[in-house]
Image (spheres, rainbow, N blue to C red):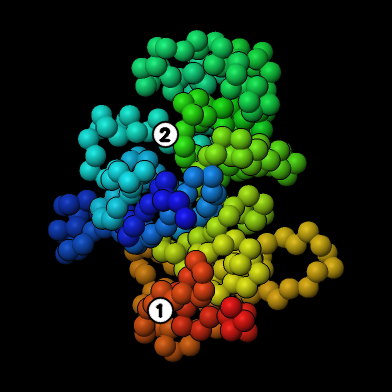
Amino acid sequence: MSEPLLSVEDLRVRFRSLGTVRALVRGVHDPFIDAVCGVSFEVRAGETLGLVGESGSGKSTVARAIMGLTPSQEGSVRFEGRELRGMAARELRALRADMAMMFQDPVGSLSPRLTVRALITEPFRIHGRTDVDLDAEADRLLQMVGLTPDFGGRFPHQLSGGQARRVGVARALALNPKLIIADEPTAGLDVSVQGEVLNLLAHLQQELGLAILIITHNLNVVRHVTDRTAIMYLGRFVEQGETETIFRAPRHPYTAALLSANPEPDPDAEHARVELQGEVPSLMNRPSGCEFHPRCPYAQDRCARTAPPLTEAGGAHRYTCHFPLNAEAMAAE
């Protein structure tokens, strides 16, 4: 097996919840919240990994921490074996040419004052690339994502959501990166346009050998394009493994709940529905033991007292649950 292109180990991200003075007045000794709590994963060249979870689970924070846009306090982020955390700004900037990020809002992430041509070629200017014909590169990139060269003269407000997303893909591909981090790549798009964007990413991945990290809550996206999936809850991974394995036999009740809430394309298909109780707890008041237990329909006394260990379920499939689902499938493996 090839060495991972991106390797994240025990990544932790904390945000201050109270100012210094207010924390002193209230007697709060640790005025921080843990947004990401020790996640670990790898992405190899040509592979797609999906990070899945509800809003506020920490998915986007992980992506921004990898890119150095959000500071992380502990752990390791290695790209091609090089540690990114603590790297000098000049070195990190040069390395970012091999990593590109697509932000969630396809139109809002594009400067309204720049033309599409200027937006697509901006990475060349940022990285001081003077050895390229910018007009020719803009035309090449537009054609690569299925747009005609005349789109280069338009402004973002003149684009549909799908066209803006294609421009975002073209911009991400400008410097021939090895890794693309796509934050909710289909957000705000019609279903038909979502399919077009996903097919485009899959085609470009096959053609260019890209590694892709997709951040999403859309399980249809995950099943369509990812090789492996990691499920996040309150900043932790509760389950991860090969996508088809997780869809076929989820171990964690949270994973099962997400899957059962996913729209089923076959109206005659039967599947058990797992109902979640209550709302997502506040990061400032994390539950004891298994943090999912207040919402879990299968929780027992042990769940409230003790955090479950990370358990191997065969292959790369791992989960954290005292009473995992699909015991028969586990025995078969």
* Front residue of 209 and 59: 209
Q: 221 above or below 261?
A: above
Quarter placement of the C terminus: bottom right
Q: 231 above or below 195?
A: below
Q: 63 above or below 32?
A: above
* Front residue of 316 and 266: 316
Q: 237 above or below 1?
A: below
Asked if labels 1 and 2 touch by Cβ distance under 8 angstroms, the answer is no
Q: Check disc 1: other Cα within 10 Å, few if <14, some if 14-19, many if 20+.
A: some
| Label whose residue precedes the other's in the sequence (2 or 1) | 2
Callout 1, which amino acid?
A: Pro
The image quarter in which residue 258 lies: bottom right
The image quarter in which residue 302 lies: bottom left
Which residue in the structure is indicated by mark 2? 98
Residue 292: percent from the left, percent from the top? 46, 73
Residue 208: percent from the left, percent from the top? 56, 35
Residue 93: percent from the left, percent from the top? 32, 30
Task: Identify the residue at image location x=42%, y=50%.
Answer: 4
Secondary structure found at label 2: helix
Q: Is residue 10 visible?
A: yes
Q: Which mark is residue 308?
A: 1
Q: Which mark is residue 120?
A: none
Task: Identify the residue at image location x=51%, y=84%.
Answer: 323
Inter-mark Cα distance, 2 to 1:
37 Å
Q: Is residue 297 visible?
A: no
Callout 2, which amino acid?
A: Asp
Residue 106 located left or right of residue 1? right
Secondary structure found at label 1: loop
Task: Identify the residue at image location x=55%, y=39%.
Answer: 209
